[in-house]
Image: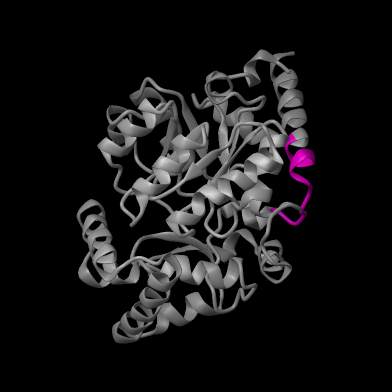
């Protein structure tokens, strides 16, 4: 492999290729995480959509499938975050991913436990703050990324962040092939992170009814809405999004309250836990009360599409790249193809 493709994050994470699979809720389950790590990249388990006490068991499932490094992604402002951090340290997980409301004490605990801290940021100023709090590697996601996203294109965000911090930066938002990997390196990143591309693989647990929607989507079908949970989210336009965007404020509020009760049942969190988490989110994201209530929509609506296989009544967080993906290769084949294309691209540029 050309030296250009062996970057700082390969050494820091103990991986062969500078590619990260993001911790997508209901999607990044043990089988997908293990398949990515076995192929020489690194997968991240999505712990945000698991009961905290179940996370350690899922970590053990991954360890039974691979002895390669992997990570766990979770929300530091959610109920049970401390339990998850303890499980990560106890099980010797290589890396921890996080984004919303970073907790300095929790980050320090992870670092003391030898865990590589890998937050995701959507703005240069957030990357600077993440570095100050102890980040070892920072994933910076541009506007093309799926789910919660900011307004700055990847092509502007990545070089800006790479210039602003000293730790390695990983580019996310719009990546799916080897040419993209080379472009990210040119921007100053040390690798790429992909979500939607890994969602569309053979090892992805997402039901066929839902992956068919991703395969059928055109680039123009992937848009940004604030109606799912009050924050900008890039999604595939579907029946649910159209209903939310045309509904009244009262309808959306009732909808959010119903999902809040379902989320409480799923996580086992108390009302006090949820209120504490909501207040932390409101402070960090500067949300209105209605937006804070809407925040519980996302995990439950994503479950409807990503786990229950109902893409009409659930929401479909997706990067813009869904519009150019129509195949579901094995993770090993996908990663090999990306690396081969990156090698060929580098040869073309240097000869």
Residue segment shown in magenta: 325-335
Where residue 28 appears, as percent x and y from the top left, is 59, 52
Q: Is residue 330 magenta?
A: yes
Where residue 190 appears, as percent x and y from the top left, is 53, 25
Q: Residue at x 41, y 77 (%)?
A: 245
Q: Is residue 180 magenta?
A: no
Depth check: give the residue in front, 111 or 306: 111
Q: Is residue 96 visible?
A: no
Which quadrant holds the N terminus?
A: top right
Q: Is residue 133 visible?
A: yes
Where residue 347 appears, as percent x and y from the top left, is 74, 18
Q: With respect to residue 349, does 88 lie above or below?
A: below
Instruction: Tell me if 120 is positioned left or right of 132 in this view.
Output: right
Depth check: give the residue in front, 179 or 109: 109
Q: Residue at x 38, y 45 (%)?
A: 99
Depth check: give the residue in front, 342 or 101: 101
Where residue 152 appears, as percent x and y from the top left, is 40, 45
Q: With respect to residue 208, does 176 lie above or below?
A: above
Instruction: Tell me if 316 is positioned left or right of 323 in this view.
Output: left
Which quadrant holds the C terminus?
A: top right
Q: Residue at x 68, y 50 (%)?
A: 31
Instruction: Tell me if 312 is positioned left or right of 245 in this view.
Output: right
């Amino acid at each position: 492999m050309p030296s250009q493709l062996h970057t700082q994050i390969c050494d820091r994470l103990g991986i062969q290729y500078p590619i990260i699979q993001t911790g997508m809720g209901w999607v990044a389950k043990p089988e997908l995480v293990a398949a990515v790590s076995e192929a020489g990249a690194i997968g991240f388990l999505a712990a945000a959509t698991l009961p905290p006490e179940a996370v350690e068991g899922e970590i053990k499932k991954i360890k039974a499938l691979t002895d390669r490094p992997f990570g766990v992604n979770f929300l530091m402002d959610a109920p049970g975050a401390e339990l998850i951090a303890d499980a990560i340290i106890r099980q010797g997980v290589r890396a921890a991913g996080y984004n919303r409301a970073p907790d300095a004490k929790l980050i320090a605990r992870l670092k003391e436990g030898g865990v590589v801290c890998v937050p995701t940021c959507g703005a240069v100023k957030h990357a600077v703050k993440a570095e100050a709090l102890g980040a070892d590697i920072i994933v910076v996601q541009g506007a093309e990324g799926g789910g919660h996203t900011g307004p700055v294109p990847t092509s502007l965000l990545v070089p800006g962040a790479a210039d602003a911090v000293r730790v390695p930066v990983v580019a996310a938002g719009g990546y799916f092939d080897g040419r993209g990997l080379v472009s990210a390196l040119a921007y100053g990143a040390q690798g790429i992170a992909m979500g939607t591309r890994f969602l569309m693989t053979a090892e992805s647990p997402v039901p066929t009814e839902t992956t068919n929607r991703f395969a059928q989507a055109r680039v123009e079908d992937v848009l940004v809405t604030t109606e799912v949970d009050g924050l900008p989210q890039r999604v595939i336009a579907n029946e649910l999004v159209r209903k939310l965007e045309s509904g009244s404020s009262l309808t959306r509020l009732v909808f959010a309250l119903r999902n809040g009760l379902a989320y409480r049942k799923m996580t086992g969190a108390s009302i006090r836990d949820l209120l504490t988490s909501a207040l932390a989110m409101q402070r960090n994201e500067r949300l209105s009360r209605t937006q804070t209530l809407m925040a519980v929509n996302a995990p439950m609506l994503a479950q409807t599409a990503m786990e229950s296989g109902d893409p009409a009544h659930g929401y479909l967080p997706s990067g813009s790249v869904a519009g150019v993906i129509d195949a579901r290769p094995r993770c090993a084949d996908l990663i090999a193809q990306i690396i081969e294309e990156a090698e060929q691209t580098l040869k073309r540029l240097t000869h």
